[in-house]
Image: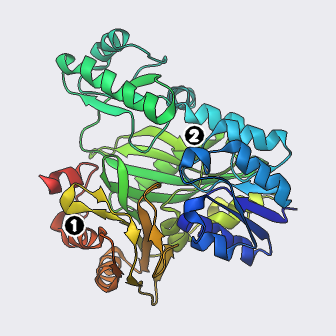
Amino acid sequence: MIGKVLIANRGEIAVRIIRACREMGIETVAVYSEADREALHTQLADEAVCIGPAPSAKSYLSMEQIISATVTSGADAVHPGFGFLSENSRFAELCEQCHITFIGPGSDIIRRMGNKQEARNTMTAAGVPVVPGSTDPLTDAEAGAKIAEKIGYPVIVKAALGGGGKGMRVAETPEEFEASFNTAQKEAQMAFGDGTMYLEHYVRHPRHIEFQILADQYGNTIHLGERDCSVQRNHQKMIEEAPSVALSEELRSRMGDAAVRAAKAAGYVNAGTVEFLLEDNGQFYFMEMNTRIQVEHPVTEWVTGIDLVKEQIRIADGRHLSYTQQDVKITGHAIECRINAENPSRNFRPSPGTITDMYLPGGKGVRIDSAIYSGYTVPPYYDSMLAKLIVHAKNRKEAIRKMRSVLGEVIIEGIDTNVDYQYEILNHPDFVSGEVDIEFIEKLCR
């Protein structure tokens, strides 16, 4: 059985995993860069190991340093969290070779689902709806232009590897295609070290709906309902909620079945997310599969009562799923707001620095996932997320009111944050009515 887990991450997700392990009686090892020496996760873990200087490439992305820390600390498992090496098939493979339990899917699954083109082809073969697009990897604009003509404009150029909104450009017309392709490819090469691209027909004004999946190594696969992640900026989510107001019970059933079918087609094991684009007419398309725990997993935990991190660990430990599909009941409504160190009035410019004073509220139905404290210095090297505010209420209307109350109480001084911006969104009539799509923030900023 897993007795000691090394968390190959930082910030609030590292703290989240440490707490889950503590409740399961499992020892934890934190890793940290020189910039994170005073970070909360290093203080909460049973042990902490420095793995290098501040830049991610020399610390949190250093496979050799993390594997070495795992071996020397005596940890028998690694939890990668999200971001960094969480979807790196080579890292998962190294863990396998070193007989370290990787708390996530196998390296072969990560590799296949991480390549968006291969993932699309897998879903097509399984009968899961996909957006019309290219079937082979693309490396030059001329070949891409010919396929774009067949698919039909507008098209979106995407990096075959990677995520987070990087390496993506929309071409509205043939005249725009070459510049869009070259720009996206250059960005993909810089961000992921790979310039392989693929094309899809660009679906206008869709919602972003994702289904949480759990699967064990014995063939048991279930979904835990959906999350609506349509409020996003530059393809990065800002607010997530569960369930979605856009789904009828019939549509929820069809999409859930498709998500389970997708996971089984991939041979998936552990926690994962199947992401869809949903049009107004109820047509949905597979977008991608995330082979890790998601930032927004707490909203699913609120409405189902299932601890996803603990389930990840149990599955990795070779146990059967703790739940069947019939056990999953959606209760109430949950909303999550990501609080970032950034200034929305200055084009969301990052705002690292020292937090001089802070207050994060609590109360019934309020959850704060964070790793900040008064006096903590937010480093400039990593993602700007400071905290996740999550609320749960009996319905969406009450959840919105509760989140407004929570946002109104938050105090974070010394740096800029997007708290006021999130409050504006929670009061926008389109958000309140549920009439949002993935272009909502762009319209708001015009």
Q: Callout 2: helix, strand or loop?
A: helix
From this viewpoint, is residue 307 visible?
A: no
**Could you tell me residue 387's position as x and y percent?**
44, 70
**Could you tell me residue 196's position as x and y percent?**
47, 22
Q: Is residue 420 left or right of residue 50?
A: left
Q: Residue furthest left?
A: 446
Marks 2 and 1, how far apart in space?
A: 31 Å
Q: Residue at the location (69% across, 43% down)?
A: 63
Q: Nearer the viewer, residue 259 or 291?
A: 291
Q: How many marks?
A: 2
Q: Is residue 373 left or right of residue 312?
A: left
Residue 262 circle label: 2
Q: Residues within 10 Å of mark 2 (few under 14, many from 20)?
A: many
**Could you tell me residue 442's position as x and y percent?**
20, 50
Q: Which residue is mark 1?
A: 433
Q: Residue at the location (54% across, 65% down)?
A: 11
Q: Is residue 102 above or below residue 286?
A: below
Q: Which amino acid type is shown beneath numbered disc 2?
A: Ala
Q: Dividing the image into 4 quarters, which one contains the N terminus?
A: bottom right
Q: Residue at the location (58% across, 74% down)?
A: 40
Q: Nearer the viewer, residue 386 or 429?
A: 386
Q: Nearer the viewer, residue 185 or 437?
A: 185
Q: Is residue 39 above or below residue 160?
A: below
Q: Is residue 357 above or below residue 18?
A: below
Q: Which amino acid type is shown beneath numbered disc 1?
A: Ser
Q: Residue at the location (26% across, 51% down)?
A: 437
Q: Which picture quadrant has residue 407?
A: bottom left
